[in-house]
Image: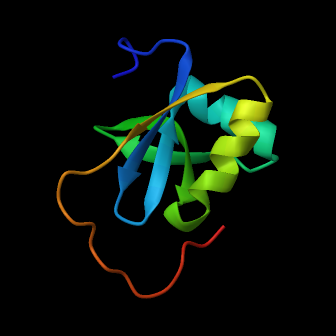
């Protein structure tokens, strides 16, 4: 999807969070003052950030104020219900 929107921060909804990867994750982590996380993808360590869906409007507003374009990618199926919360 990044090739379709090269100037936008891509947020991909996975269950109850929007995940941001690679260079976009580095931008988001710096802007929000968050620790960059890492995810294993086929044996490769990928930079990522997870943002809870319940606060996504607040994050999008921060991105817009910082001059960033945002592209949201949502799941077509109903997200799984989870008990508990995302830990930082």
Q: Residue at x 66, y 67 (%)?
A: 88
Residue 43 on image: x %, y %: 33, 38
Q: Residue at x 17, y 59 (%)?
A: 77
In the displayed structure, 31 sits above or below 37; it is: above
Residue 14 lies in quadrant: bottom left
Q: Residue at x 36, y 81 (%)?
A: 82
In the displayed structure, 54 sits above or below 14; it is: below
Residue 29 appears in the figure: no
Q: Residue at x 54, y 21 (%)?
A: 8
Q: Is residue 43 left or right of residue 85?
A: left
Of all residues, the one furthest to the left in this rendering is 77
Residue 15 on image: x %, y %: 34, 63
Q: Quadrant of the N terminus?
A: top left
In the displayed structure, 37 sits above or below 64; it is: below
In the image, 57 versus 18, the foreground residue is: 57
Residue 68 on image: x %, y %: 67, 24
Residue 23 lies in quadrant: top right
Q: Is residue 88 left or right of residue 11?
A: right
């Amino acid at each position: 999807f990044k090739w379709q929107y090269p100037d936008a921060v891509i947020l991909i909804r996975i269950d109850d969070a929007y995940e941001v990867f690679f260079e976009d994750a580095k931008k988001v982590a710096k802007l929000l003052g968050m620790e960059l996380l890492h995810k294993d993808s086929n044996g490769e360590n990928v930079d990522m950030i997870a943002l809870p869906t319940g606060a996504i409007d607040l994050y999008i507003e921060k991105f817009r104020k910082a001059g960033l374009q945002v592209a949201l990618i949502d799941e077509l199926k109903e997200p799984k219900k989870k008990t508990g919360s995302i830990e930082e």
